[in-house]
Amino acid sequence: MSPRIRRFVQAAACGMAFFPQMIRADGAADETLDPPVAVATDAMVAASDILGGERQVPAQLTAEMKYVMQPAPVTQPEEPVEATPTAAPSTAGAFGGFVDLSTLSPDRAASASNSASDVVSGAEAEIRNTADTSDLLVRSLSSTGLYVHSRNPISNDLRVRGFRFSQIRNHVHGAFWTPIRPDFDSPLSKIDSSLIKDVIVVKGPYSVRQGPGFAFIDIELHGTERYEGGWGWSGRSAAIFDTNGDQFNFRQSFSGGDETQGIRVGYAERGGVDYESGDGFLVASGYHSHDWDLAYGWDVGPDSQLEFNYQRVDQTDVELPAQYFDVDYLVADGFSLRYTEECLSWADRFRVDAWWNRSRFAGNATNQTKPGVGGGNFGAGPGFPLLIGNGNIGEARSAGTRMAISWGCADCGMVTVGADYTFVDQEYIETADRYFGFFGLPRSIADNPGIFADSTLPLSDRTTVKAGARVDWAGVNTVPGTLPQNAMDDQNYTLGAGFVTSEYELTDVWTLNAGYGYAERAPTPTDLYALTFLELLQPGGDLDFRGSLRGANPAALDKERLSQFDVGASYEYCYVRGGINFFFGWIDDYITYQYDGGIMDTVNTDARLAGGEWFTEVDLTENWTGFATISYVQATDDVRDEPLWGIPPLDSRVGLRYQQPGWGFEFAARIVDNQDRIAQAIFTDGVTSASLGEQVTPGYTVLDVRGFYSINDVWRLVGGVENIGDRNYQEHLDARRDLSYGTPGGVFRPGLNAYFGLIGTY
């Protein structure tokens, strides 16, 4: 950490600790700004006003609800037609902050109640002007330790601490999503953030219900409404415009239903052209996207519910700056079905999820903004001949099911057992004549049955212990197809995972958390079989990636094995609340890359990761709140004895928020340190080196202001100004290859941007 950042963080921490005392003239230690219930009430009232709904009573009423997605049956309605929300709103409010876990279902509350987990409310999407799920998570003030590699304003690849790609398991309303190829699309970029109710981020191997992974993203979509007194309907309209890149976002949805069933239908249209970086350079980042969503819920009985969700995303003409290929089209369809029943004679809760999704794309390297086509300054001559006339097509299909049976409750102790099965069928190929039939990923099948069990056990009024374990049988194989290499190869892995966490209420103010988790992960088809141009590392550009079973001396990869410790504490006293967490982990047989005669080979190494996060909020007055967050991760390649590649630097945010029931605004500064811990050895084989290795990234500070104003009970305005100083800056994870027409430097983030929008809920 640089001295400049260290001094700033120290000053901010001291100021936020002592300023609340300074503004209270009497300095009485026992005088509180707001009792806990009043604070929650104010936040929930503000959130309800922003969302255009009725004001909700906080925890006392939400505790009476059985769980989020299944309201109590309606009997003898007194009002003619009135919408009944399917879930209580989060106390986080429109700007984010602490999320009341009592508003989550028992399963989700159990997953979120440890120091390595964050809960992000989807209500933040409106105020923060977010595009996809990754964008929501990294902008939210409710999350720490999350970073993003941005390929386009609507395509962002999330990193969790030092974890990346397939080390992170992504689930959307119970359904597993996977990318077609790891450098081209992201599962989270296919989910519009306005559809999200909440997201649970588990930043370590502390969950066993979502399959084998090192971190977990669990997205809950908005449910369907119920209406008392017969059929009723409601709607939502939104229009938001960004000045930088002429970006627009229009969404319309309608909901209808009666006492026992509900339906929602929605459509959205997004578009934009090249944005300007802080120095006025046009970054090739245009796009057009439209999506549909359909949800249907049916209360089969007083204790059972059936839910169906469908999402379709259709993206065209998406420019990916500093990458080989742009997207001609990318289409994704996802279907999910969930059945839940409670109060059975043989169990307290039974849930089954089933899903099927399909993604396909076509890309090209003929856009004039591509290096080599327009005259890039790398390769031989004025252009890079390997790109000329090349294209890329691919497809991925995922299907699976999960069954879980639970006994007990979160407060009195709960035990859950279950089984799941995931199937992925994946292929992508280069289409140029000189590459067709050789470059790409042969059609590959990955299937993974598994069993799991976990429990929550309150040992006393102050101590709660959670534990879980799972076993998986993962297979990866190729089938005859367009790419004959490695046809009928078959790799099999037995995977294990387990965790134990504890929570101890030390005092009425402090709660201590600790946990240990172990998990194993099998290599993906890309890790084993791919031979193609991939943009996985920061440099981008002329790096070909070869799977471990493609080459002169093929060798199957070993499975990755993670062991991780977390220890932390949370605090809530009068007008101050927050938490701090530290983690340390090591990954045996970490899957990485090594330069070898012009190609990046996929290999195993050993790695260590360590870091921490801190967040706090301070109610300075009834309406003013100060906040701060810090995230840091350090990772080392033990075999090469150098920093691990693609690790973000220290990232912090500080700011002030003012909020009334009908309006509010927030001023925030994001302060990012320089990153000089970079990988070098993986870019050389001892004889030759890649033309461009990982580069140092300077630090920067970006200032934003945003807010909302409720015109009436239906309509509200949102808006803000981002990057107020028009700072020209780069994120460490973004590509550094030439942007266009030989201009060096890589991807720079947008400069000054003003956005404004009108949202109605009726």
Image (cartoon, helix red, strand yellow):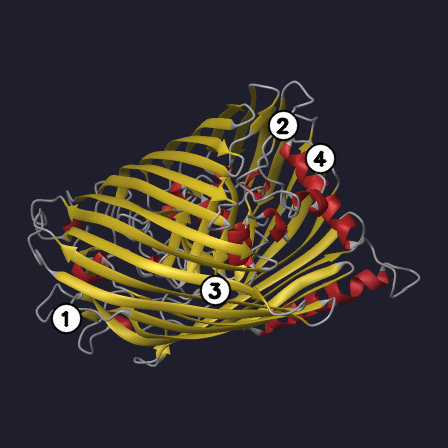
Q: Circle 2 — which element?
A: loop
At which x and y percent is residue 541?
A: 26, 56
Please rate how many residues cluster around mark 4, counting C-alpha atoms within 10 Å: few if below 14, some from 14 to 19, many from 20.
Answer: some
Mark 1 residue type: Ala
Looking at the image, residue 48 lies above or below residue 487 = above
Please rate how many residues cluster around mark 2, counting C-alpha atoms within 10 Å: few if below 14, some from 14 to 19, many from 20.
Answer: few
Count of number-bearing discs:
4
* Disc 3 and disc 1 in contact, CB within 8 angstroms: no
- The residue carrying mark 4 is 55
Q: Earlier in the sequence, mark 3 or mark 2?
A: 2
Q: Earlier in the sequence, mark 1 or mark 4?
A: 4
- The residue carrying mark 2 is 75
Q: Return the residue found at the far front.
A: 345
Mark 4 vs mark 2: in front: 2
Question: Alpha-carbon distance for marks 3 and 2?
Answer: 62 Å
Question: Alpha-carbon distance for marks 1 and 4?
Answer: 61 Å
